[in-house]
Amino acid sequence: MKKILKAFLALACMTALAACGSKKQDTAAVEIDYGSSELYTKEDMDEAIKLIQEEFSKWEGCELHSIAYTSDDDCNEDNIAWMNQLEAAGDAKETFTQCIQFKSNFHSPKEGGGAWNPDQEYTDWGWWLARADGGKWKLMTWGY
């Protein structure tokens, strides 16, 4: 009986340790601020936010706290031209007519790694997306 109990405890400890390294963030825990927009619906924004969350999920050890829509003012001729320059630099053929920006807050891994300072809160991290009228959002660039 003691052998079985020891084996069970050892298995439970290994399972708990393995789970620590592969922790996935609950996207429902991320605070979303849709702000006020006359250009975009909640559904438009949700499509864009989904792309942001997909990219963020690749950032090992980072914890996303919030995503906020910035302003309709950011969808202007200059920023749309910038999105089209980014698209052209990647040899893509799409011409964008709309862009959208979000800001996020997140925490870096305790040990740091990659481009991240260890155990730091990053605030107002910008995310830019673009699309043609009625098209799908494309994540174009992110950072400070």
Image (tube, helix red, strand yellow):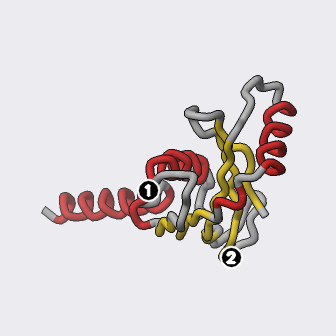
On residue 8, the disc is none
Q: Which of the image's four quarters has the N terminus?
A: bottom left
- Asked if residue 72 shows in the view, the reply is yes
Q: Residue at x 56, y 45 (%)?
A: 51
Taking the spot 42% from the left edge, 67% from the top edge, the residue there is 29
The amino acid at mark 1 is Ala
Residue 135 figure quarter? top right
| 123 or 12, nearer to the observer | 123
Measuring from the top left, give residue 9's x and y in whole percent: 27, 64
Inspect the image, locate mark 2, and give the three-letter code of the amino acid beneath it: Gln
Q: Which residue is mark 2?
A: 120
Residue sitting at the far front: 38
Q: Secondary structure at mark 2?
A: loop
What element does badge 1 sit on? helix
- At 50% across and 64% down in the image, what residue appears? 34
Circle 2: is it few (<14), some (14-19), or many (20+) Cα within 10 Å? some
Query: Residue drawn at (58%, 51%), measured in percent from left and top?
Result: 52
What is the quadrant of the C terminus in the image?
Answer: bottom right
Position of 47 with respect to 100 (left or right) is left
| Relative height, residue 65 to residue 49 (above, below) | below
Residue 109 is situated, as x and y percent measured from the top left of the image, at 63, 67
Residue 63 seen anywhere in this rendered image of the structure: no
Residue beneath label 1, please? 18
- Separation of residues labelled 1 and 2 (CA atoms): 24 Å
Q: Is residue 11 left or right of residue 18?
A: left
Compared to residue 81, the image places residue 119 above or below, namely: below
Which of discs 1 and 2 lies nearer the camera? The answer is: 2
First of labels 1, 2 by sequence position: 1
